[in-house]
Image: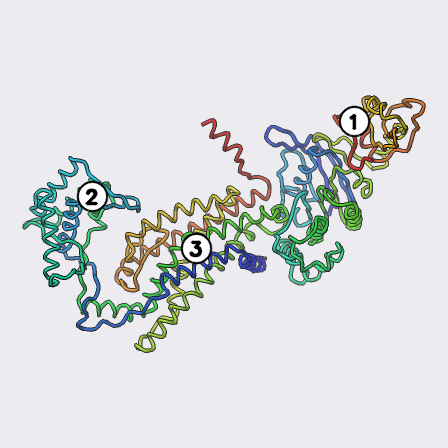
């Protein structure tokens, strides 16, 4: 029965207007974000620049972090992301004084005037280095630490700065870093990783997944909600409830139909960058991984589609309303902003929407791989649990044993 | 295997409100009518039988299957709810096919049964029509077709003729009678005419209680000698309505021909007449808050 029902559910989804709107949004996402992506060329010697890379040199990290601190101190305004959202922090007199003391201890610069002068001097030196023309700032302000400042002391003080700012600042342990310009050798190594380790398609499949997961973190909920509400709107609930088919078969056939119908356009869209990679690889003599996009779609994107669809079905069966759209909307919003900090990849955490907004950074991907796998398994498992609960609720509704009473909730609220 | 529905001491509660009070019934093959006013508890009883509501107290079995074994009962039961529709964008055939799959019918079985049933309910030429384009009567006929799609032993039909025009109503009743030749059909209605035209055995439900169970002819016998007819002036009508239950009225110029219930001959010009189901039902209901007035079908 499952197979026959699954096919009919797929047909129903394909006939719904919401589905085609979802497909249109995915196409829009793809064309605006990835439509003009060009495959990276092999770096050539003598290029003006090769991009930036993160350095693990403690001195460089101290210079970049202290430079940023002094610049923000001179502006009297600090940028933080306490729960993933941007927040501008202004300090009171006592906190401002303590930041000044930390700057003095770490850089020897005393007071706001000296800090402003240090920042101006740095920009002036950059302009001079570029012959008086508008300089291209590859990195932020860099200020050398005082002699004898140990990295341990620096870390302790920066933790204190982050605490003063309320967390989520550039001085937090996870955010401290220094971006340095890449050399030709660095660029060649990065290109080698892309073409040999990632076999070209691996890197571009990650970039594709990065753009797609943004929208797949919300869109399937609309399909799940409309499917679950359709029976009630069509006056068909009781006709279905009294059928022999089990609740597990009914719910899972709907669930898998939505997953399938969402994955199909994503797979279709992936053929475009795949064909670009194939075209480039045949000219450059690179052996590509033909299945890379399929692997990333099922490994990276499917768990997100699964959990978003499960949230949609669970809350709709639970409440008989479109509440799931609000729940998922809020979750998506927080995930997008939280994920923005790890946009370059390698830092996946437990975010619903893991980011990796570059075809490069294979090393970062390797370092974060086990976390990414845990993340994806967690959301896939959570989706299975939610669907099991949805089956239970549905079976209780069929027997008349569960019905959410909004009047009862209203009365309860009044009593509270 | 048992071919009856057995209901023993069924009580049903919605919170503190008791919707069914100690209901006991045995329903055998053929048409069975369940008559009662709106809110009498008919739909609640139908829903318990269709496994859509868990019973609060008592024993209910459908052809030997306890209603608590929902899947078994669903396998042998067809249900047409009072208010229903189908996915509006599906064609008649697709809707039947979808529900057939949910009933566990195989491809061949569906291929054979669906055209057969559509023909039986006179929708064979509308199978490609979208559900949203069907009239009320056509939808009801499609409803019956979907309810017997899996060839159930029991068909439960809740208020099926409400909102149908007279022609569709007659067609629908005939269809139910045909179907009842081979299975139990429970027809729940507040329209006495539907029961009169289709059922031999009935039960009357009022305020959750069974106040009558037996045959239609036995019910009519209860009202024999209690039904009178008289031509009175319009001025006298109000006074008559205060004293007797009027089952029908027909205006004749300045006079009115009234049919009413009385325990003995009320006045000389009143002539005794043969009781009908409607008279018998009103006789049964008088004194139970049934009020003086007309049922559906009153002239």
Instruction: State the separation of the CA atoms marked 1 and 3.
Output: 63 Å
Instruction: State the separation of the CA atoms marked 3 and 2.
Output: 39 Å
Q: Quadrant of residue B258?
A: top right
Secondary structure state at the residue bearing disc 1: loop
Q: Position of residue A319 (x, y in %)?
A: 51, 41
> Circle 2: is it few (<14), some (14-19), or many (20+) Cα within 10 Å?
few
Name the residue beneath numbered marker 1.
Answer: B292
Q: Tell me: A300 left or right of A142.
A: right
Whether residue B45 is situated above or below residue A351 in the rendered picture: above
Front: mark 2 or 1: 2
Looking at the image, which residue sits at the far right?
B268
Name the residue beneath numbered marker 2.
Answer: A77
> Circle 1: is it few (<14), some (14-19), or many (20+) Cα within 10 Å?
some
Count the numbered circles shown: 3
> Circle 3: is it few (<14), some (14-19), or many (20+) Cα within 10 Å?
many
Q: Tell me: B177 left or right of A134.
A: right
Q: Tell me: A51 left or right of A338.
A: left
Q: Position of residue A127 (x, y in %)?
A: 12, 59
Tell if the residue under mark 2 belongs to the same chain as the one under mark 1: no
Name the residue: 41% across, 55% down: A216
Q: Quadrant of the C terminus of chain A?
A: top left
Front: mark 3 or 2: 2
Name the residue beneath numbered marker 3.
Answer: A305
Q: Are marks 1 and 3 in contact (CB under 8 Å)?
A: no
Precedes in sequence: disc 3 or disc 2: 2
Kindly identify which chain the residue marked by label 2 belongs to.
Answer: A
Q: Position of residue B224 (x, y in %)?
A: 89, 30
Q: Nearer the viewer, residue A46 or A249?
A: A46
């Amino acid at each position: 029965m499952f197979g026959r029902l699954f096919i009919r559910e797929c047909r129903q989804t394909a006939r719904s207007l919401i589905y085609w709107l979802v497909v249109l949004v995915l196409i829009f996402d793809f064309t605006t974000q990835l439509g003009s992506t060009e495959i990276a060329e092999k770096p050539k010697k003598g290029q003006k620049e090769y991009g930036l890379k993160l350095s693990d040199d403690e001195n460089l990290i101290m210079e970049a972090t202290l430079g940023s601190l002094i610049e923000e101190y001179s502006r009297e305004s600090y940028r933080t992301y306490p729960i993933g959202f941007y927040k501008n922090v202004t300090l009171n007199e006592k906190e401002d004084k303590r930041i000044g003391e930390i700057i003095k201890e770490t850089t020897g610069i005393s007071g706001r005037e000296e800090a402003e002068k240090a920042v101006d001097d740095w920009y002036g030196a950059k302009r001079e280095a570029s012959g008086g023309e508008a300089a291209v700032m590859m990195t932020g302000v860099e200020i050398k630490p005082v002699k004898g400042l140990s990295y341990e002391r620096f870390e302790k003080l920066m933790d204190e700065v982050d605490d003063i700012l309320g967390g989520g600042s550039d001085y937090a342990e996870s955010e401290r870093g220094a971006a340095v310009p890449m050399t030709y050798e660095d660029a060649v190594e990065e290109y080698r990783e892309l073409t040999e380790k990632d076999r070209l398609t691996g890197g571009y499949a990650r970039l594709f997944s990065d753009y797609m997961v943004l929208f797949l973190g919300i869109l399937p909920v609309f399909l799940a909600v409309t499917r679950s509400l359709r029976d009630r709107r069509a006056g068909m609930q009781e006709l279905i409830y009294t059928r022999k088919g089990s609740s597990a078969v009914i719910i899972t056939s709907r669930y898998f139909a939505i997953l399938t119908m969402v994955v199909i356009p994503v797979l279709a869209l992936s053929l475009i960058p795949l064909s670009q990679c194939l075209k480039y690889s045949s000219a450059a003599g690179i052996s590509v991984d033909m299945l890379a996009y399929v692997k990333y779609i099922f490994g990276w994107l499917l768990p997100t589609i699964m959990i978003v669809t499960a949230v949609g079905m669970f809350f709709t069966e639970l409440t008989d309303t479109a509440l799931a759209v609000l729940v998922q909307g809020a979750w998506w919003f927080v995930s997008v902003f939280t994920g923005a900090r790890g946009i370059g990849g390698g830092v996946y955490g437990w975010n619903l929407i893991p980011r990796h907004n570059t075809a490069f950074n294979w090393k970062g991907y390797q370092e974060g791989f086990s976390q990414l796998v845990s993340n994806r398994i967690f959301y896939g498992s959570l989706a299975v649990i939610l669907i099991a609960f949805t089956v239970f609720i549905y079976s209780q509704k069929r027997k008349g044993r569960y019905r959410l009473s909004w009047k009862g909730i209203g009365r309860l609220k009044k009593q509270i | 295997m048992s071919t009856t529905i057995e209901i023993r001491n069924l009580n049903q509660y919605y919170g503190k409100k008791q919707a069914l009070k100690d209901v006991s019934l045995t329903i055998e093959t053929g048409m069975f009518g369940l008559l009662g006013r709106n809110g009498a508890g008919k739909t609640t009883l139908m829903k318990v039988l269709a496994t859509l509501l868990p019973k609060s107290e008592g024993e209910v079995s459908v052809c030997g299957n306890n209603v608590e074994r929902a899947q078994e009962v669903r396998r042998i039961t067809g249900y047409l709810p009072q208010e229903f529709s189908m996915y509006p964008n599906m064609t008649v055939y697709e809707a039947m096919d979808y529900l057939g799959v949910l009933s566990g019918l195989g491809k061949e079985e569906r291929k054979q049964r669906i055209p057969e049933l559509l023909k039986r309910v006179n929708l064979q030429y509308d199978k490609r029509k979208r559900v949203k384009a069907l009239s009320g009567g056509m939808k009801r006929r499609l409803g019956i077709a979907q309810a017997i799609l899996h060839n159930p032993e029991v068909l439960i039909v809740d208020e099926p003729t409400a909102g149908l025009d007279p022609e569709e109503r007659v067609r629908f009743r005939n269809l139910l009678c045909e179907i009842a030749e081979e299975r139990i059909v429970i027809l729940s209605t507040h329209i006495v005419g539907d029961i009169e035209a289709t059922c031999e055995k009935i039960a009357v439900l009022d305020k959750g209680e069974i106040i009558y169970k037996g045959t239609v002819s036995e019910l009519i016998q209860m009202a024999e000698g209690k039904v009178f007819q008289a031509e009175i002036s319009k001025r006298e009508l109000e006074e008559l309505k205060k004293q007797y239950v009027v089952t029908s009225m027909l205006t004749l110029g300045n006079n009115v021909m009234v049919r009413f219930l009385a325990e003995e001959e009320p006045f000389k010009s009143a002539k005794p007449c043969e009781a009908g189901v409607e008279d018998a039902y009103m006789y049964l209901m008088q004194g139970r808050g049934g009020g003086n007035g007309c049922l559906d079908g009153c002239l």
